[in-house]
């Protein structure tokens, strides 16, 4: 346990000591927020207004702004909880490049202990960055139009923690097989460019083709994004109901922004989404820890 604490402390210190890596992780969420607010915000607003106008309903600008802000922040958090995890976990690859990992393995440190230390330090670093981004997101939603309850705030935080946990263990498995700066950059670029699309953050899955929707419905990140959407936008939908919107219209809006997800035409409940995400995390952890321990002889 003493070795594990020392390694976790060492990994976190090295991460935050690398100013370029740290500020890249911290600035990226803020850049995404600006880009989302500048470009996607207008797209979301036009889409939302168009859907209401076609249904013959009108609503206040505050409600529309609150809806758009909640959708933007949920999209932001859905992306950075995973992409930041990959960025902050680059220390695992850097230790391979510099030979520090080999030196640690040659001592009394067990491979399993080293693997756990990388994972835990990565998770803690990711939670710090995503926690700051979540706080900024709350401020943004408050300024735009606040409809969240205390329960919504807590559940959104839970979603961020679970998705950060998913991102940390997924990045640990993938980064474990990387051994060069080129591989590290390539994986980082692929994750940054592609993850937002497959998880439904950049574009709602409901706008994809039917075949692609069925494929994406097998990915746990899809349900993580939907959880963030549901808890960020629940208050908006309640306000719509209180304003006299028919249930059918509210459900149609939920479908359009992926708050309602369907697995082969069967609606997936919130509790099922949590089960899918938690089971996925458990499976990835069950793969990562033994995988690292089995390579001890090879690394020696």
Image: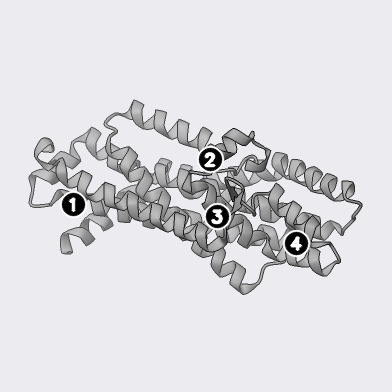
Q: Earlier in the sequence, mark 2 or mark 3?
A: 3
Residue at disc 3, secondary structure: helix
The residue sitting at 46% across, 31% down in the picture is 190
Disc 2 versus disc 4: nearer the observer: 2
Choose the circle earlier in sequence order: 3 or 4: 3
Disc 4: which residue: 145
Disc 3 and disc 4: Cα gap in Å?
18 Å
3 vs 4, front mark: 4
Identify the secondary structure beneath mark 4: loop
Local crowd size for mark 4, using a 10 Å CA cut-off: few (<14), some (14–19), many (≥20)? many
Residue occupied by mark 3: 133
Mark 3 neighbour class, 10 Å CA radius: few under 14, some 14 to 19, many 20 or more: many
Name above or below for residue 154 compared with residue 159: below
Front label number (2 vs 3): 2
Q: Residue at x 62, y 42 (%)?
A: 205
Instruction: Report the quarter where the N terminus lies.
Output: bottom left
The numbered mark, 4 or 1, whose residue comes first in the sequence reads: 1
Q: Which residue is mark 2?
A: 216
N-terminal label among 2 and 4: 4
Locate residue 111 relative to residue 165 in the image: left or right.
left
Mark before the other along the chain sequence, 1 or 3: 1
Scheme by which the image is coloured:
one colour
Q: Disc 1 on helix, strand or loop?
A: helix
Bin the neighbour count of mark 1 within 10 Å (Cα to Cα): few under 14, some 14-19, many 20 and up.
some
Residue 183, horizontal then vertical, whole percent: 34, 28
Q: Position of residue 129 (x, y in %)?
A: 47, 54
Estimate how packed mark 2 is, as few (under 14), some (14 to 19) or many (20 or more) residues with alpha carbons within 10 Å: some
Q: Residue furthest top?
A: 182
Marks 2,4: beta carbons within 8 A? no
Direction from residue 101 to residue 159 in the image, left or right:
right
Question: Mark 1 = which residue?
Answer: 112
| Alpha carbon separation for disc pair 1 and 3 | 31 Å
């Amino acid at each position: 346990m003493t070795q594990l604490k020392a390694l976790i402390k060492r990994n976190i210190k090295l991460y935050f000591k690398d100013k370029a890596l740290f500020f890249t992780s911290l600035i990226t969420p803020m850049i995404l927020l600006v880009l989302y607010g500048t470009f996607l915000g207008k797209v979301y607003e036009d889409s939302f207004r168009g859907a209401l106008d076609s249904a013959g309903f009108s609503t206040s600008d505050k409600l529309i702004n609150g809806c758009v802000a909640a959708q933007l922040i949920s999209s932001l958090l859905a992306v950075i909880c995973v992409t930041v995890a990959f960025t902050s976990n680059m220390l695992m690859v850097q230790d391979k490049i510099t030979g520090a990992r080999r030196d640690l393995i040659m001592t009394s440190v067990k491979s399993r202990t080293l693997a756990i230390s990388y994972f835990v330090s990565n998770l803690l670093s990711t939670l710090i960055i995503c926690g700051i981004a979540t706080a900024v997101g709350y401020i943004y939603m408050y300024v735009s139009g606040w409809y969240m309850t205390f329960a919504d705030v807590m559940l959104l935080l839970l979603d961020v923690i679970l998705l950060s946990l998913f991102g940390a263990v997924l990045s640990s498995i993938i980064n474990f097989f990387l051994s060069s700066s080129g591989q590290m950059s390539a994986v980082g670029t692929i994750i940054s460019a592609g993850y937002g699309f497959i998880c439904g953050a950049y574009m709602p899955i409901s706008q994809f083709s039917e075949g692609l929707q069925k494929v994406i419905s097998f990915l746990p990140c899809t349900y993580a994004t939907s959880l963030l959407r549901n808890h960020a936008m629940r208050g908006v939908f309640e306000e719509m109901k209180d304003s006299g919107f028919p249930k059918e219209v509210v459900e149609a809006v939920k479908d359009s922004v992926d708050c309602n997800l369907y697995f082969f035409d069967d609606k997936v409940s919130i509790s099922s989404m949590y089960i899918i995400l938690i089971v996925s995390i458990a499976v990835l952890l069950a793969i990562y820890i033994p995988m690292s321990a089995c390579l001890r002889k090879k690394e020696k």
